Image (cartoon, grey):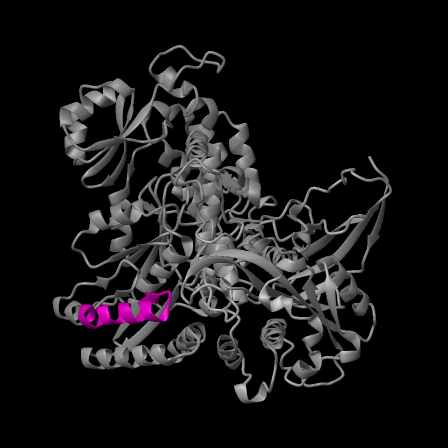
Amino acid sequence: MQNQKEQISQSYSLIGMDLFTSICPNLRSFKNLLLTGSYQNTGLIFSKEVIDLALQAVGIEESSQHDLTLNEYLLLLVMKRALMDAGLDQVQTDNDFLSTVVHFPVNNSSEPNLTRRDASETSLTRISKLIHPPITLENSVIVRGNFEDALERSLFLLENPSCKHLVLFSFFSYSSPHIEILDADSTNPAGDLVEDLLTGLGCIVLSNQTNADNSYADLIWKKFQSQSTNSSLDIPTKAEIWTENSDAKTQNEEYPHFQSAPIVRLIQSALSLNNQTHFPDPEPNWKAEELASEEYRDFLRPWFPLPYAEKRESVIWLQERKDNDSAIWLEKGYLSNYHPDQPFSNFGLYLLPISFDNPKQGNRRIEEIKKRITNTPNLVDFINDSLAEFESQKPSIYTLVVLGSSGPGFIDELEHAQDGVLKSIEDGRDWQTPTGSYFTPNPFGPKEKIAFVYPGAFGTYVGMGREIFYLFPQVQDALLTLTSDPGCAINETEIFPQRLTSSIREQLQNKLNNNPTQMISSGVCFSYLFTIILRDIFKVKPDVAFGYSLGENSMMFAMGVWTQADAMRTSLEASPIFHTRVSGQQNAIREFWKMPIENGENSNSSIWANYVLMAPFEKVRAAIQNEERVYITHINTPRQVVIGGEKNACKRVVDNIQCMHLQAPYHHSIHCEPIASEFDAFMRLHDWPVENKPDIPIYTAADYAPLQYDSKSIAKSFAKMLTNPIDFPRLVNLAYEDGARIFIELGAGNNCSKWVEATLKEKPHTTMSINQNNVDDHVSILKLLARLISHQIPVDLKALIGNSYGYQNE
């Protein structure tokens, strides 16, 4: 390996950022692009008129802007927003030392119009009069060169002890196909769709204090000067991003998309660290083509902490100089404060509650809201103000909840609501739209009991819960209550792969389906996290709880009765119960059927199959009387039953009944007579200390009664439940008789919600779920909140306005 001289700068805190490009005119829109692949076509992005409007939105009136050049307009806008992001815009003292470095790249004759002007025309003096805190001009500089030159100059200025903060700007060039170019210098007719060279501007605010409160990350610059050429660096394994020398391309080379610019990579990495999330490359419409073919796709995925590590790290490698390579190291300690954010708003879907006491008042309120939305300059601020106002109001008789992603989208939903709500009140039926807007004329109110329902363990799917760690960064801290290795416990390799094709997803799902210990572990984690989100963040409290099959296991952790998830997973992995007894070779079944035992070396295909039958229990029970190797394992609803047993025998039952049916994707055998031999083994697996005794009843299918909070009693209940058929309608009716009217499913999918609905039928009740397969988490959660709010259930909406990075585990 070559010899290298490594030079390392001191550490600085990155405390603020902003971005301005044709498809991402601000930092929020860049976050939205990372999260959803959607972007804005802003047309003439560098016109004075466009920037004037943006400046007015951040409090700088047109009359105060004087005769700024286009460069200066853009610098003023981006600096103002970055200082606001850093929390420095309200600083009143002039003692703060604010330096600036403005980077103009050298792109030879192919420079776009904006950077073609001489950098000397850009005057920081004119800008400094409009910015607070003021710019210290004697410690500010304009750099023409590559990004490394600008970064080196910035860190040199920050070495001055009196320089507390520095703003680094970087202009960059990029190609953006199909952007409407209306520039006066363009040779294309107005309105033509062309591919042209555009200019963007990125900005970061650095503090000379390491680990500054609420920073995005700490920044360190490392230079590696080689003593020999053409040798590779010994690169550490981190979250790495490579940035090519885009500043040195000739006019004959194709320009990259804007995300390859060093400043953009730096901003993306800082967001990733702060939000504990790996983002896909910010390509427009990446999500619209999600797994449409065998082409690899990158996906949003959580960034879990490693056991015993103290921080996350991201490395941006720069290759802009011939004599050396350098890298920007970004670090974020696990215990560091997070930079404030509004994760729900960044997805671009918003929730708006509207309260009223009668139809006439409701129609008037809708008209008022439509006018306010039409006239608002900032939809996000309007939504946040409306949420805060709603929380401070006294309850009304009715609450309409509207979901929308834009002003016109909200107007459209509200216009549909004007007719829908009136009809809903007249006929007494709920009203809802595909977007998720919801209204009920029969709200249950805060006095009705809420039941938390935990689905079975075998519903976890690839990509499940992908967004919840971004939406609620505090849940990673909550997960550490259960496990020292969250990524392993939740099975991130299978559930959150970095890259996917449709066939790889199918392979990973099959792997999960055939590994019950992984399914159980993942199911526990997700149900626990969904409970934290609903109970501890949105403050929706349960009055009763029950689970479906191994969902009782998830329920125990979610309710805090058990906390030792790592120990339980170790026990499951070490025990033969889910490897060779009821799964795998299924020797418990073989012994009961008096078949030869298999040791795994000569294992054939599974001897057991599970079928879901759309038929009444009585009819199924009669049909299996003549089959010795078929058993009823689950009663899901009065007209849906699960049978398990020898595959051909199950098929004969299906043919006999002639009902709709489907074969389950798993072959595990529980809840049936042949595994009664495993009673003691199940007891040992579920004999854990009682860490907490909830003050609400937790029902078990062992005795169809509240669980007794005693370790031995709980272990026996689990063994009894797992070796006997499940009667889910009986559990549902038990909770209903106890007063539960609102049933919320907290796990994978919404099967239990459908079964509750089918069981209770016309009885007064409502069902909801926090997760749905093939529905984004932010969408399913907002739809759940819309239903809760319309039913007058108290909900703490602060998480929708902005993150309070903490929770109380109650």
Q: Is residue 362 left or right of residue 794?
A: left
Total marks in image: 0
The reply to whether residue 107 is visible in this rendering is: no
Residue 711 vs residue 81, the one in the foreground: 81
Quarter occupied by the N terminus: top right
Is residue 435 shown left or right of residue 684?
left
In this view, the residue farthest toward the bottom is: 63
Considering every residue shown, the one lying at the far front of the view is: 187
Left or right of 263: which side holds 801?
left
- Residue at horizontal 41 percent and vertical 29 percent from the top: 679
Is 405 drawn above or below residue 468 in the view shown? below
Q: Main secondary structure of the magenta part?
A: helix
Q: Residue at x 29, y 64 (%)?
A: 437
**Does any portion of residue 423 appear in the rendered image?**
yes
Percent position of residue 114, x then y:
60, 68
Residue 419 lies within the magenta run: yes
Q: Is residue 412 magenta?
A: yes
* Residue nearer the viewer, 31 or 778: 31
Coordinates of residue 585 in the picture (x, y in percent): 43, 19
Q: Is residue 6 above or below residue 22?
A: above
Answer with the quarter of the image where residue 99 lies.
bottom right
Q: Is 176 or 568 nearer to us in this picture?
A: 176
Left or right: where does residue 306 sit relative to residue 586?
right
Residue 180 at x, y = what percent? 44, 63
Coordinates of residue 42 in the picture (x, y in percent): 45, 67
Q: Which residues are magenta?
A: 402-421
Q: Residue at x 23, y 78 (%)?
A: 362
Give above or below for 727 relative to 190. Answer: above
